[in-house]
Image (spheres, rainbow, N blue to C red):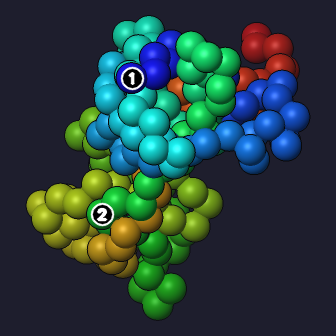
Amino acid sequence: MLTVSRLIPRGQGLAPVLRQRASTVELDWELRQKSRLSATDSAGRALGIFLPRGTRLRGGDMLVAEDGSLVRVLATPQPVLLISACPKHGSPFDLTRAAYHLGNRHVPIELQPDHLKIEPDPVLADMLRALHLIVQADNLPFEPEGGAYAAGQGGGHGPHGQHTHPHH
């Protein structure tokens, strides 16, 4: 088993050719939340991934194995609910309202300008439909927000929450 213990978020600083040549490992959101796991990469190698506790992997992250080889993380498609505003009866503000209600329930949520994604939950789907939103089951990669205090865990400005303007 090849040990992996180093993460390069989004492959920052690596030449594109190195990211492209790397083997890949496909992981769903449940597995990408774990800091210790076993997986098999696209080259058929067994990987033992040991990262600092609390580390969450994102699609596009690069892992460095003990032999120096690179492994690119792919967010594998998984069952999700795709939530969008109803063009006939609603407005884009309805997505903001939905994000508020889902956030109050501490639901992992992927935010996009024109839709939201959550893991399947029939009770939440009914609540969202009652808010006049369109809820469709799909099979897509899931990249939920890391939260306001999850530095480097996605969801902020730029890659992995980095931004450079000063705060007052």
Q: Name the quadrant of the N terminus.
A: top left
Task: Compute the Cα span from label 1 to label 2.
Answer: 30 Å
Can you say whether 4 is above or below 12 in the image? above
Which residue is depicted at the point 17% across and 59% down?
121
Q: Nearer the viewer, residue 75 or 156?
A: 75
| Location of residue 125 in the rendering, given as x and y in whole percent from the top left corner | 22, 66
Category of crowding for the residue at label 2, using alpha-carbon neighbours closer than 10 angstroms: few (below 14), some (14–19), many (at least 20): some
The answer to whether residue 60 is seen in the rendering is yes
Q: Quadrant of residue 12?
A: top right
Which residue is at a point 28% across and 54% down the rendered structure image? 119
- Choose between 27 and 132: the one closer to the eye: 27
Residue at point 58% right, 26% down? 63
Q: Is residue 18 above or below residue 130?
A: above
Mark sitting on residue 79: 2
The reply to whether residue 148 is in sight is no
In this picture, residue 10 sits left or right of residue 151: right
Of badges 1 and 2, nearer the viewer stands 1
Residue at point 83%, 25% (across, down): 13
Quadrant of the image containing the C terminus: top right
Amino acid found under the numbered disc labelled 2? Pro
Q: Taking 157 as reference, is 63 left or right?
A: left
Residue 60 x, y percent position in the rendering: 63, 41
Q: Considering only order in the chain, which callout, 2 or 1, is on the residue closer to the N terminus? A: 1
Dot 1 corresponds to which residue? 1
Q: Nearer the viewer, residue 65 or 6?
A: 65
Q: Secondary structure at mark 2?
A: strand
Name the kind of residue labelled 1 in the image: Met
